[in-house]
Image (tube, rainbow, N blue to C red):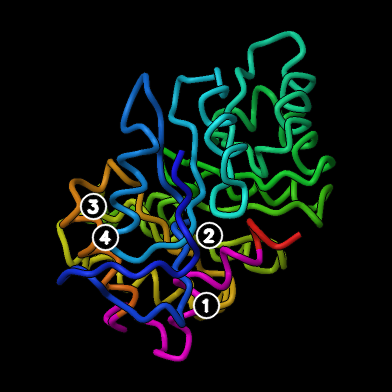
């Protein structure tokens, strides 16, 4: 498996930034039963000079061996986020198994799991795994529950993926969604700018208000860029969303761009 050197430059028109800025994709899918194998993911990464990636298991897949093999072959540039079937009698033991491989620094949980299997949250927190939280119905209605879990595990590291699934065009749900910003009081909760295409077309302007609020509450040092490849679309879609971050078009300051584009993700996912 060919490794991707840190800071590798692309040679064509797709080159976005100098190698001085390390870009890290903090949310990309990779697989053989769904989505794209690692060779295709690497090709898309190279097109945008993306040096490293966090590979997140897709919904419904609990066999994490492919991601394990991919990460084991290049742990300097790749890390994994596993999934565990919360209905297993020993789901926590299964999570510990994947953690012990050394290839997974995070686990993906959906908000519905918090109610039926909160022990997975606790196990992840206690083992030091990053909790990558997906809220298909919006995170707003789960803030009280998340707050209680974080109160019990204040050192837990939590990533709110896809901006917490904001209610674009649904004014009635907007007030509930704003509750997500209460979670900023926990120092290890991160707000991820990913999955924007799921809510509105590029350049995703209806999301800028929420991103601006995240900057004000979480601060730019807890914002992460993630592509959500290949759900984002093709290579051009991948690059278009990345340019929103690197060009300064999104509502955070230009001096914050290196942090949002890579430094925060490196600190969370790759620093020892």
Kindly identify which residue carries mark 2.
179
Q: CA gap, disc 3 to disc 4?
A: 19 Å
Mark 1–mark 3 Cα distance, whole angstroms, equals 22 Å
Sequence-first disc among 2 and 1? 2
Cα–Cα gap, marks 2 and 1: 25 Å
- How far is disc 3 from disc 2 in space, using C-alphas? 23 Å
Left or right placement of residue 129 versus residue 154 in this view: left
Question: Which mark identifies residue 213?
Answer: none
At label 2, counting other C-alpha atoms closer than 10 Å, the crowd grade (few under 14, some 14-19, many 20 or more) is some
Q: Are marks 3 and 2 in contact (CB under 8 Å)?
A: no
Residue 271 lies in what quarter of the image? bottom right
- Give the structural element (helix, strand or loop) at label 2: helix
- The residues tagged by marks 4 and 2 sit, at their Cα atoms, a distance apart of 37 Å
Label 3 sits on a secondary structure element that is helix
Residue named by callout 4? 47
| Comparing labels 4 and 2, the label whose residue is closer to the camera | 4
- Assign a secondary structure to mark 4: helix
From the top left corner, tell me how far across and down residue 36 is, in percent: 32, 33
Q: State which quadrant residue 2 falls in.
A: top left
Q: Nearer the viewer, residue 268 or 113?
A: 268
Q: Of the residues tagged 3 and 4, which is closer to the observer?
A: 4
The label on residue 259 is 1
Q: Is residue 230 left or right of residue 181?
A: left
Mark 2 or 1: in front is 1
Residue that carries the numbered disc 3 in the rendered image:
197
SS for callout 1 = helix
Q: Magenta part of the protein: which range?
A: 247-267
Indicate the position of residue 210 as horizontal and vertical percent values: 38, 68
- Front residue of 189 and 146: 189
Q: Residue at x 34, y 70 (%)?
A: 9
């Amino acid at each position: 498996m060919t490794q991707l050197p840190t800071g590798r430059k692309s040679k064509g028109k797709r080159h976005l930034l100098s190698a001085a800025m390390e870009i890290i994709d903090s949310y990309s899918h990779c697989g053989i039963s769904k989505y794209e194998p690692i060779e295709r993911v690497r090709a898309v990464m190279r097109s945008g000079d993306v040096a490293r990636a966090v590979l997140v298991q897709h919904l419904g897949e609990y066999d994490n061996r492919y991601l394990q093999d991919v990460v084991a072959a290049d742990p300097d540039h790749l890390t994994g986020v596993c999934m565990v079937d919360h209905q297993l009698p020993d789901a926590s033991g299964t999570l510990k198994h994947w953690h012990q491989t050394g290839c997974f620094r995070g686990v993906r949980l959906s908000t519905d799991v918090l109610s039926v299997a909160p022990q997975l949250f606790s196990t992840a927190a206690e083992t030091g795994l990053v909790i990558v939280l997906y809220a298909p119905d919006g995170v707003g209605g789960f803030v009280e529950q998340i707050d209680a879990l974080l109160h019990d595990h204040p050192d837990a590291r939590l990533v709110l993926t896809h901006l917490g699934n904001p209610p674009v065009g649904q004014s009635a749900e907007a007030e509930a969604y704003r509750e997500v910003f209460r979670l900023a009081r926990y120092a290890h909760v991160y707000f991820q700018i990913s999955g924007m295409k799921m809510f509105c077309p590029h350049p995703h302007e209806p999301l800028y208000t929420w991103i601006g609020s995240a900057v004000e509450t979480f601060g730019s040092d807890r914002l992460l860029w993630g592509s959500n490849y290949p759900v984002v679309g093709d290579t051009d879609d991948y690059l278009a969303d990345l340019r929103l971050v690197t060009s300064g078009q999104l509502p955070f300051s230009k001096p914050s761009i290196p942090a949002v584009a890579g430094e925060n993700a490196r600190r969370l996912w790759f620093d020892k």
